Image: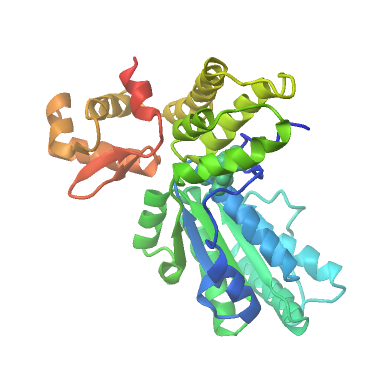
Amino acid sequence: MINPFRPTAGAEPPQLVGRDGYLDEFIYGLKIRSGAPGLLTIMTGARGIGKTVMLNEAEYAARQEGWVVISETATPGFAGRIGKAAQNYQQELGEKPASRRLTGISLAGLSVTTALRPEEEIETRYLIEGLLQNLEQRKTGLLITLDEIHAADRQELSLLASWVQHYIRASLPIALVFAGLPAAVSDLLNEGVATFLRRADRIDLAAVAVEEVAQSYRQTFEPLKVVIEDAVLAEAARVTGGYPFMIQLVGYHLWRIAERLEPGAILTAEEANLAFAEARRRNQRMVLESALAPLSAKDREFLQAMALDEDRSTASDIGRRLGASKSTVGNYRARLISAGLVEPAGHGKLRFTLPGLRELLQGN
Ligand SMILES: Nc1ncnc2c1ncn2[C@@H]1O[C@H](COP(=O)(O)OP(=O)(O)O)[C@@H](O)[C@H]1O
Ligand SMILES: [Mg+2]
């Protein structure tokens, strides 16, 4: 049996831990097909918490219902790429767009990386509308998923939002599911870029319960026929902190050790500790260091000052430690929130979003 764990961004895990029922509202909406609240959903959460995987789940559920799916990431040109994909589907369905003749659309392949020109904007809107009318007749619909919207170009996002708003008003079968980092998504919505998106169902993904992780490990390791004591699996679950990326890393490295043992052999606590250390090291390298890499020296100093606190930090403490003014602290705070490294934790306090970040900063 091959290692079932998948410590890779967006990869389907062997078990989707702790997310039962999260998509119920969305799936219910797929049956109603137009105007149901779950058809407009935003997933938010820190890196590695499982946003992309949830988008994949939504896409799977939509396809099960016979829906057409366009899956995009919010890098420049996404509105054009969505239009191009809609056009491809429309051709596949063997019909011309219903409402308009296409003129001047020069979307070359799916590699569009530039914003639409004004005349293309209108054509693309009608093009998608044509597909939706076609799907409406077939009693299915179109799901668009858009990942990493924290990085989206504001204008492109408001363009997409205006299209979708229009389709919803026309009772067409459209669903839109977004994913992004929480604070940046909040900013996006508050800026009024796409006011109607504020009405979207918001699913805040957090770490899952450690007990559920232990339960999942018991089931996933079962077929290996190696003896792994419950205390070891409980410790493995505790090490993950319920953070999905760590669930995969710890599981993966534990599996690598376990699969080398003879059937019936016991996996010792020492061996398990090796797997935990490796998982922590990888999390540090793959998540934490890449999150820290683009930061300036000043950003890092700010985080170092925060790491002195055991739990949440207050702006005034940070300011004192750095010898910085209130407005300077405010600026760095905003930058680091947008970068997804820290988040507001009530009453002007801040905390780290990523597990292990404080420990990494404290260690050097
Ligand atoms: N509910 C879950 N249970 C177990 N593993 C998960 C779960 N959700 C995501 N994962 C795993 O966590 C990692 C990160 O998931 P991903 O969707 O890429 O996170 P994000 O998009 O939020 O950065 C992947 O390895 C994925 O397989
Ligand atoms: Mg992702």
Percent position (x, y) of residue 109? 77, 52
**Residue 285 percent location from the top left of the image:** 51, 23
Q: Position of residue 121 (x, y in %)?
A: 61, 67
> Which residue shows up at 37% across the image and 56% down it?
186
* Residue 9 visible here: no
Question: Left or right: where does residue 201 sit relative to residue 228?
Answer: left
Q: Looking at the image, which is closer to me, 317 or 322?
A: 317
Direction right: furthest residue: 94
Q: Could you tell me which residue is drawn at 77 percent across and 77 percent down?
A: 97
Question: Residue at image x 61%, y 34%?
Answer: 7
Q: Quadrant of residue 304?
A: top left
> Which quadrant, please, contains the C terminus?
top left
237 displayed left or right of 192: right
Q: Ligand 1 quadrant? A: top right
Q: Is residue 258 above or below residue 62?
A: above
Residue drawn at 54 percent across, 46 percent down: 50
Q: Residue furthest front?
A: 264
Instruction: Confirm whether residue 113 shows in the render.
Output: yes
Residue 90, percent across and down? 79, 70
Residue 250's place in the image compared with 121, above or below, is above
Is residue 297 shown above or below 246? above
